[in-house]
Image (tube, rainbow, N blue to C red):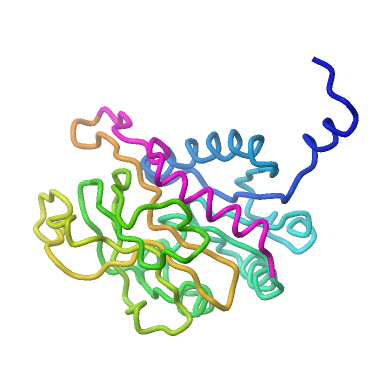
Amino acid sequence: MYLGTNALHAQQKVKFNVIAFYTGINDMAHVSFVHEANKWFSKTAAQYKFTYDSTNNWNNLNEEYLSKYQVILFLDTRPEKPEQRKAFQKYMENGGAWMGFHFSAFALTPSDFSQNWDWYHQVFLGSGQYKSNTWRPTSAILRVENQQHPAAKNLPETFKASPNEWYRWENDLKANPDIDILLSIDPASFPLGTGPKQHEIWHDGYYPVAWTNKKFKMMYFNMGHNDIDYENKTNKELSFTFENKLQNQLILNTLLWLGNDRK
């Protein structure tokens, strides 16, 4: 079918450019999510007029490379080299936008991912170190805390998330005036997790799972851990993050907000 010049131009017009960084090596549950995310964002990009690129080369986290992109995604990990971290901080402080998933906020001293980046974990994310998690990966009922936020458009007050490993953090995000909590685990979810260890099952408490820092254009999502059959050693994928229409709407709303409403 022939498209007129104006129609062709409109179809090709790109609103913003997205670059996703990932490692895709550690933990099959995270690797599964990375592969799934790259497919979903690539497919969605064509429909909503943004470009989507991804890279596992964290050395691309530099000023020249980032100048082409309006939104950065961290799909599974964080930058480790000082020059990469410096470039990311400068990008964000100069009005860039960011969306991070699950393990991208993880830090625990001592571990392979020590808390050795105060700006990112204490200032930017506000969460501090990882404290604990639920197990096995299970669905949770999430409550929308800020229904006026653009990311919450067309979402009900509560909805069921895809199965996930849910994190608890060192810092009380409610007490941080810079943090705007978008989603938390609704009490209807409890008990959350199946164990076998008792501390892996949550029976009460308040757990933020998506938030933004009002000083930056950013959103962090706790989601990003698919369920894998580790127990029977088949390593079969048992769940997928992007097989959830309401959760997908949330992620898409967030991306369009970050890409179209830049500081």
Query: Between residues 185 and 231, which one lies in front from this camera angle?
Result: 185
Q: Position of residue 87 (x, y in %)?
A: 69, 68
Residue at 40 percent of width and 52 percent of height: 155
Quadrant housing the C terminus = bottom right
User: How many numbered circles are shown?
Assistant: 0
Q: Quadrant of residue 200?
A: bottom left
Against 20, is 40 above or below? above
Query: Between residues 203 and 113, which one lies in front from this camera angle?
Result: 203
Residue at 88 percent of width and 26 percent of height: 4
Q: Position of residue 81 (x, y in %)?
A: 60, 65
Against 249, is 93 above or below? below
Q: Position of residue 71 (x, y in %)?
A: 65, 57
169 left or right, relative to 99 = left
Query: Between residues 61 and 39, which one lies in front from this camera angle?
Result: 39
Quadrant housing the N terminus = top right
126 left or right, relative to 45 = left
193 left or right, relative to 149 = left
Q: Position of residue 104 (x, y in %)?
A: 46, 59
Residue at 22 percent of width and 56 percent of height: 134
Residue bounds of the magenta highlight: 234-263
Does the magenta segment cover residue 247? yes
Against 197, is 238 above or below? above
Does the magenta segment cover residue 238? yes
24 left or right, relative to 108 = right
Query: Between residues 113 and 251, which one lies in front from this camera angle?
Result: 251
Most distant residue in the right direction? 5
Residue at 74 percent of width and 49 percent of height: 15
